Image (cartoon, helix red, strand yellow):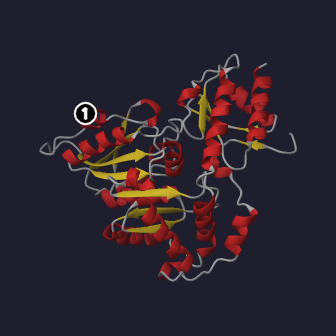
């Protein structure tokens, strides 16, 4: 194994920089559970303004943001939620929506992790039919994770939200990589979140902080979210230490996401030139690169032996660029793929 590893497994693998660590060490702190941590309070206010919502609540993880949001919107009375079949609550949250909220889950199909408004309309239940679940919640993931880091166009989101309004659905935006979408598209985070009752952003992915996410919504919804935060064990004490890392990330690491996007496109274009690799580089819009090879497991294992970490999903290979992998690292990864295939 080489001395250094090019870690393209995920953008969750980032290490806090020396400057971020210093900001965390210097953070003013207090009892977050009592609302007395000034750094947490400042972060929550900043995120609420960023997303155009009344209030926000700091949580340990994005999965908790999703699960609390589902609990806010879903009643354990046969309510059904609609989301893409590759969305995070289906693939990576341990069935939490069923266990914690009693939710029926209706997976929708669509290219790149996105679905059409008409696909949602086609799955709506008849509210007068006592045999069926109740249509209740629709969730959009921006950007799409296992869909390849694709950016939902505002027009497509508008179509989904129009159907949601027509059928009285609640709406939630999974914004784990929302700021990747804003940097790639030029749209504001608030404009993407505008039609959703709840929305959140993550700090421990491309933004490079070690911990945390913030869920935003109306004052009434966030007050209820704080109750679920306590119930699920998410309330903390002197959490300003980790919130300071998140604030530093918001202040310094947003615009630089464009570098990750450029590196991802460079990687995709290089992969497309290799015999045995199947990928369309024009579909790489942000920092996620998913490609096909004849034997993904063998390629994955050979890359790991060469010091390049990627991940496997549904018979495909995924690489995610981030602030800890520069252009030289991407070039090394390409060389490793070329050698492994040869």
Residue under the point 24% across and 36% down: 121
Q: Quadrant of the C terminus?
A: top right
All told, the count of numbered labels is 1
Q: Nearer the viewer, residue 67 or 272?
A: 272
Q: Quadrant for residue 221, please give it.
A: bottom left
Residue under the point 15% across and 45% down: 127
Q: Quadrant of the N terminus?
A: top right
Q: Position of residue 242 (x, y in %)?
A: 62, 69
Near mark 1 (Cα within 10 A), the count class, few <14, some 14-19 or many ≥20, is few
Q: Pick out the residue farthest to the left.
A: 128
Question: Residue 338 vs residue 108: left or right?
Answer: right
Q: Pick out the residue farthest to the top.
A: 275
Q: Nearer the viewer, residue 104 or 18?
A: 18
Q: Nearer the viewer, residue 40 or 180?
A: 180
Image height of 21 relative to 125, above or below: below
Residue under the point 52% across and 41% down: 145
**Mark 1 secondary-structure assignment:** helix
Q: Is residue 232 visible?
A: no
Q: Quadrant for residue 8, please give it.
A: top right
Q: Position of residue 128 (x, y in %)?
A: 12, 45
Q: Nearer the viewer, residue 249 or 106?
A: 249
Question: Residue 52 vs residue 8: left or right?
Answer: left
Question: Residue 218 vs residue 51: left or right?
Answer: left
Residue picked out by circle 1: 122
Q: Position of residue 222 (x, y in %)?
A: 37, 68
Q: Position of residue 330 (x, y in %)?
A: 74, 37
Residue under the point 18% across and 42% down: 131
Q: Is residue 12 visible?
A: yes
């Amino acid at each position: 194994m080489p001395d250094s590893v090019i870690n393209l497994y995920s953008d969750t693998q980032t290490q806090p920089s020396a400057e971020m660590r210093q900001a965390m060490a210097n953070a003013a702190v207090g009892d977050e559970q009592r609302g007395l941590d000034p750094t947490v309070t400042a972060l929550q206010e900043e995120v609420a303004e960023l997303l155009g919502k009344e209030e926000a609540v700091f949580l340990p993880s994005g999965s908790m943001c999703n699960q609390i949001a589902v609990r806010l919107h879903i009643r354990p009375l046969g309510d059904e939620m609609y989301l893409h079949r590759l969305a995070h609550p289906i693939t990576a949250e341990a069935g939490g929506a069923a266990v914690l909220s009693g939710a029926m889950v209706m997976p929708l199909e669509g290219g790149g992790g996105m679905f059409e408004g008409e696909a949602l309309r086609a799955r709506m239940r008849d509210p007068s039919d006592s045999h069926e679940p109740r249509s209740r919640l629709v969730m959009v993931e921006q950007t799409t994770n296992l869909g390849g880091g694709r950016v939902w166009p505002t027009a497509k989101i508008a179509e989904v939200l129009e159907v949601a309004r027509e059928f009285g659905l609640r709406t939630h935006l999974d914004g784990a990589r929302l700021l990747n979408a804003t940097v790639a598209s030029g749209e504001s985070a608030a404009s993407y979140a505008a039609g959703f009752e709840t929305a959140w952003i993550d700090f421990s992915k491309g933004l490079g902080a070690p911990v945390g996410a913030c869920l935003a919504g109306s004052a009434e919804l966030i007050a209820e979210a704080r109750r679920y935060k306590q119930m699920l064990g998410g309330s903390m004490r002197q959490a300003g230490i980790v919130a300071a890392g998140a604030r530093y990330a918001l202040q310094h690491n947003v615009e630089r996401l464009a570098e990750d996007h450029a590196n991802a496109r460079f990687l995709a274009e290089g992969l497309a030139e290799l015999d045995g690799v199947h990928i369309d580089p024009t579909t790489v819009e942000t920092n996620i690169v998913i490609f096909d090879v004849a034997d993904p497991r063998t390629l994955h294992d050979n890359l790991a032996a060469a010091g390049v970490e990627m991940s496997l999903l549904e018979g495909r290979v995924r690489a995610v660029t981030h602030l800890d992998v520069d252009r030289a690292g991407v070039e090394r990864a390409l060389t490793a793929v070329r050698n492994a295939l040869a």
